[in-house]
Amino acid sequence: MSMNFVLIEKLIIKKFKNYYIFKFLIFRHFSCFKYVYVLNDKFAFKYFNKIYKTEKFKYLSDPIIPIKINNNMDLRESLGIGLKEQVVLHFGAMTETKGTLKILDFLNEASEIELEKKVFVFAGVVKSDIKKEFYKLIEELNGKCRIFVFDDFVDFDFTASLFNSSDVVFCPYQRVYQSSGVIGYCVQFNKPVIVPNQGLLGKLVRNNKIGITYEKFESQIIFDALLKAKKYRISNNYLTHHTIEEFSSTILKSI
């Protein structure tokens, strides 16, 4: 990496930070902003209030809207998946930042013995930024391990079937400083999730006992996480404290 590139990168990061500082100062000093809600991060709103010497920042829970199940298919039976096979679900729009290609690279590097009795399900629209490479890797993995791809919009009934039929949900997201609706589904359907240890996402999963977090995306660490997931029992604490009623009550109190 050249010195010029490093300097440019540092300058961009500095400007990015300055932009956010400027934005929060506007929130702090302009009376048209009565409250500023910080979604799903109980630490951040206290931190902002402290450094900006205000009480404007408020915590707002990210509400879970439980899926109403009308037609719960047994995907294991329809796809010919045995009861002893571990089904790993990667759910939602497939993009670079969701870590979709990282999973395929991980499968490419693993041995057939390591992947034995593991089934990987990719469910959600594969976005154009990775579509070509995604299907190239899928083709390379043909015959090495069992993979099912549902490259389409996933409705609520099929979402329920996917989560009910899976053993663990894998979310190696790059954007860890934001929450995800997937962890709400994991709690509703009692399925552990595997996510990076960093950022808000890692904190939510750890603190609410929704699944397993990892420090580095390395083969042995991921295989260890998949092994732990088999015996992991998640808590319903997140579901209890992230209701629509709690979300609405917080908003209504400020009106």
Image: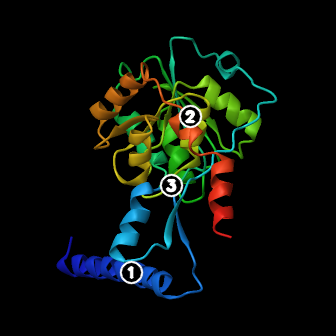
Q: Is residue 98 visible?
A: yes
Location of residue 148 (image quadrant):
top right
166 left or right, relative to 193: right
Count every numbered label the image shows and give the total.
Answer: 3
Mark 2 is surrounded, within 10 Å at the Cα level, by few (under 14), some (14 to 19) or many (20 or more) other residues, namely many
Task: Say above or below: 108 vs 57.
Answer: above
Q: Which residue is mark 3?
A: 40
**Residue at screen point 29% across, 82% down:** 11
Kindly check if marks 3 and 1 are in contact, taking CB atoms under 8 A apart as contact: no
Q: Which residue is mark 2?
A: 187
Question: For numbered disc 1, what is the local secondary structure?
Answer: helix
Q: Amino acid at mark 3?
A: Asn
Task: Say above or below: 6 vs 101.
Answer: below
Kindly check if marks 1 and 2 are in contact, taking CB atoms under 8 A apart as contact: no
Residue 21's disc is: 1
**Residue at screen point 41% across, 23% down:** 115
Question: For numbered disc 2, what is the local secondary structure?
Answer: helix
- The N terminus - image quarter: bottom left
Q: Is residue 174 visible?
A: no
For marks 3 and 1, give the CA distance.
Answer: 20 Å
Q: How is the image coloured?
A: rainbow
Give whichever of 105, 244 is nearer the camera.
244
**Residue at screen point 37% across, 24% down:** 228
